[in-house]
Image (cartoon, helix red, strand yellow):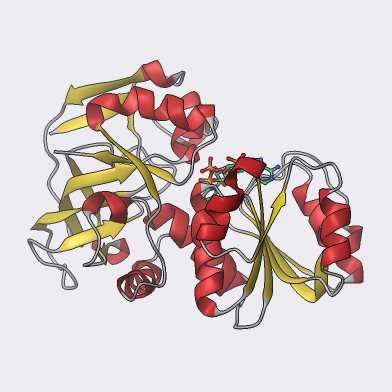
């Protein structure tokens, strides 16, 4: 098999495409012929060494996988050879999906949405799965809720907007001015430019009753600034490390719930997402498709920022 590996942490150029023995699945595992992966910020964070104590080297990167089951291990009942699947490989491990083959526990592998290409499907597991976990599982989203998505043009944000809209929420999102039309095309009712100094004052003025759910995909002081925007009993769900100390007093006044999500693998969640996708409720947001040979450039594009949706990697 071919795989992209790092032997040391570092810049994008630290990644190398190499030949390795094809693995065989153990009990309760499947061997997947990977057809597409996608690039996520966590791949960059892992590659540069943010989680080095958790990642033994050499390591394969890649936390989104879409492919075809090539072999099943003993005891696997939910999947068979030839099934088209998508999933999030185990996170903070050294066996990622930037490879022609990948072995994974069958319990976390779901059937791919039938209406999508492998590249489109590979944009979903981590990003849409995280957005679903934030809104549905932690936020307890329901029709009529008022939702604020910070970072609506990003990989997770594009799916958070669509999921909230699909359930029937009123959706407000923050993104740069150049992404206004883009986030509105995804279903956001209102865009606010995060580069405006008066952003939080404006949000407070425009939504005096507050938001039922706020999703933070940005970090820095977003939690502290957003707590004052919550409705009574509102839920703020953050997916970004709280890298700076923040004052949470405004959450106290709103009887707020504060959630941190480090996404978990769930075939059940992905199956629910696949049903919504196949029914047209969520569209894959694929900005660009590149090859495994272009992985260094793909990482550099993600690091440069300012994209609209995801970069998929075709693996043939
Ligand atoms: N905890 C978890 O389970 C989990 C799961 C997935 C991702 N994450 C993390 O969540 C973060 C976002 O991931 P992603 O895949 O969505 O990243 P991404 O695709 O790189 O998108 C980041 C987005 O943030 C926007 N942005 C930057 N500064 C902003 C600000 N001050 N206010 C509002 N928007 C701002 C950018 O918008 P413009 O282009 O408009 O400037 C960009 O669209 C990353 O740190 C990632 O590691 C965590």
Outermost residue on the front side: it is: 181
Query: Splitting the image into four quadrants, where does ligand 1 fall?
Result: top right
Residue at position x 22%, y 60% from top? 85
Q: Is residue 186 above or below residue 51?
A: below
Q: Position of residue 196 (x, y in %)?
A: 79, 42
Q: Is residue 121 above or below residue 142?
A: above
Q: Is residue 264 visible?
A: no
Quadrant of the image occupied by residue 27: bottom left
Residue at position x 72%, y 45% from top? 242
Q: Is residue 98 left or right of residue 52?
A: left
Outermost residue on the bottom side: it is: 143
| The one of 131 and 87 positioned closer to us in this rendering | 131
Q: Position of residue 47 (x, y in %)?
A: 44, 28
| The one of 9 and 123 positioned closer to us in this rendering | 123
Residue at position x 53%, y 51% from top? 182
Residue at position x 17%, y 56% from top? 30
Quadrant of the image occupied by residue 135: bottom right
Q: Position of residue 181 (x, y in %)?
A: 57, 52
Q: Is residue 153 visible?
A: yes
């Amino acid at each position: 098999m071919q795989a992209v590996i790092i032997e040391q942490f570092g810049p994008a150029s630290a990644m190398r495409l190499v030949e390795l023995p094809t693995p065989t699945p153990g009990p309760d595992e499947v061997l997947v012929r990977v057809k597409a992966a996608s690039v996520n910020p966590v791949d960059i964070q892992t590659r540069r060494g943010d989680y080095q104590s958790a990642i033994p080297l050499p390591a394969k990167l890649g936390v989104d996988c879409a492919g075809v089951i090539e072999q099943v291990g003993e005891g696997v009942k939910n999947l068979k050879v030839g099934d088209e699947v998508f999933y999030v490989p185990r996170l903070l491990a050294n066996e990622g999906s930037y490879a022609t083959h990948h072995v994974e526990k069958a319990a976390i592998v779901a059937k791919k949405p039938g209406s999508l290409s492998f590249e489109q499907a590979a944009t979903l597991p981590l990003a849409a799965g995280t957005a679903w976990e934030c809104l549905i599982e932690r936020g307890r989203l329901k029709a009529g809720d008022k939702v604020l998505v910070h970072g609506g043009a990003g990989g997770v944000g594009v799916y958070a907007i669509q999921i909230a809209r699909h359930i029937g929420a009123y959706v407000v999102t923050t993104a740069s001015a150049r992404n206004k039309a883009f986030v509105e095309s995804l279903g956001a009712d209102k865009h606010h430019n995060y580069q405006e100094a008066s952003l939080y004052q404006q949000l407070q003025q425009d939504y005096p009753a507050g938001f039922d759910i706020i999703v933070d995909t940005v970090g820095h002081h977003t939690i502290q600034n957003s707590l004052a925007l919550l409705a009574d009993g509102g839920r703020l769900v953050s997916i970004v490390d709280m890298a700076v100390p923040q004052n949470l007093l405004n959450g106290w006044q709103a009887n707020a719930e504060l959630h941190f999500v480090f996404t978990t693998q769930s075939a059940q969640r992905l199956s629910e997402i696949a049903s919504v996708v196949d029914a047209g409720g969520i569209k894959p947001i694929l900005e660009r498709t590149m090859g495994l040979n272009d992985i260094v450039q793909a990482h550099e594009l993600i690091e440069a920022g300012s994209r609209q949706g995801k970069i998929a990697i075709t693996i043939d």
